[in-house]
Image: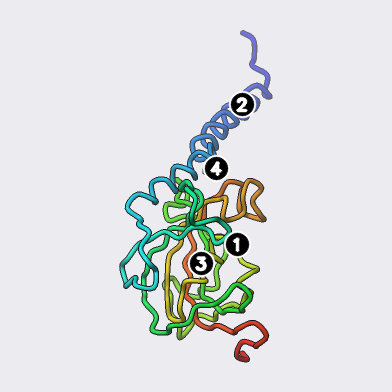
Amino acid sequence: MKRIPAIFPILLAVTLLGLLSCKETKAFDDHANWKERNTEFISGIAVGFSDKDPETAVKGDSFRLLSFKLDPEKEWGTGSYVYCQVLEKGTDSISPQYTDSIRINYRVRLMPTDNYPDGQVIDQSFKTANLDPSVNIPSSFRVSGLIDGVTTAAMHMHCGDFWILYIPYGLAYGNDGKGDIPGYSALVFEINLTEIAPNGQNLSPR
């Protein structure tokens, strides 16, 4: 009776492990068909969002805002709008301008996937699971230095506002992505505006 070489069981085990690993990776590939899935995600979100005036919006309202770079007199598709939900309504009446500086609490996620049902957190200033202005330390930005989708929304916000933004990839980091954000990524952006400094003035010291 021939003896099976000792190396044979090892090679068989390695082969089976490789096949299983490939299968598992394929089954849980969060970024498979990423462009199509992100487009569908935004199309699904867009249903029910109206062109309501954000100045009259109250807590719980949902509306869409056309990118500030586009002509509102023309017709545009779903990928040209930011979809906004008001979680908290501020009491201030002033909105930041394109050239102003602002402070915001924020959290950025990708769309929900198998491995991240709530969406993978890409960046945030939050120190707590939910917004807590007494604990969170807001970050400062120039409005003009933000991605188009956030700039569009920020210019309609007031201090104290807390919104969720659903941003198509064309108003975020586009086809190429950036850092941990793959190309064609729609973003879910939680934003709480805390301070505005008009162009030429400084934000309050920290």
Disc with the residue nearer the chain's start (3 vs 2): 2
Tell me how the rendering is colored: rainbow
Where is residue 43? Give x, y as percent: 42, 45
Q: Residue furthest top?
A: 1
Mark 3 lies on residue: 107
**Which label was assigned to residue 32?**
none
Residue type pointed to by label 2? Thr
Q: Residues within 10 Å of mark 2 (few under 14, many from 20)?
A: few
Dot in front, 4 or 2: 4
The residue singled out by tag 1 in the image is 147
Q: Looking at the image, do the residues carrying marks 3 and 2 touch, with CB atoms under 8 Å apart?
A: no
Marks 1 and 2, how far apart in space? Answer: 46 Å
Quarter placement of the N terminus: top right
Tell me the residue that label 4 is attached to.
Answer: 31
Mark 1 and mark 3: Cα distance apart in space: 14 Å
Badges 4 and 1: C-beta atoms under 8 Å apart? no
Identity of the residue drawn at 67% across and 85% down: 200
Residue neighbourhood size for the residue with mark 4, other residues' Cα within 10 Å, grouped as few (<14), some (14–19), many (≥20): some
Instruction: Locate residue 172, reporting x and y percent.
Output: 58, 56
Q: Give the Cα separation between the discs numbered 4 and 2.
A: 26 Å
Vertical position of residue 113 compared to residue 179: above or below: above
Looking at the image, tell me whether mark 4 or mark 2 is earlier in sequence order: 2
Residue that label 2 marks: 15
Q: How far, Cα to Cα, is label 3 from label 2?
A: 42 Å
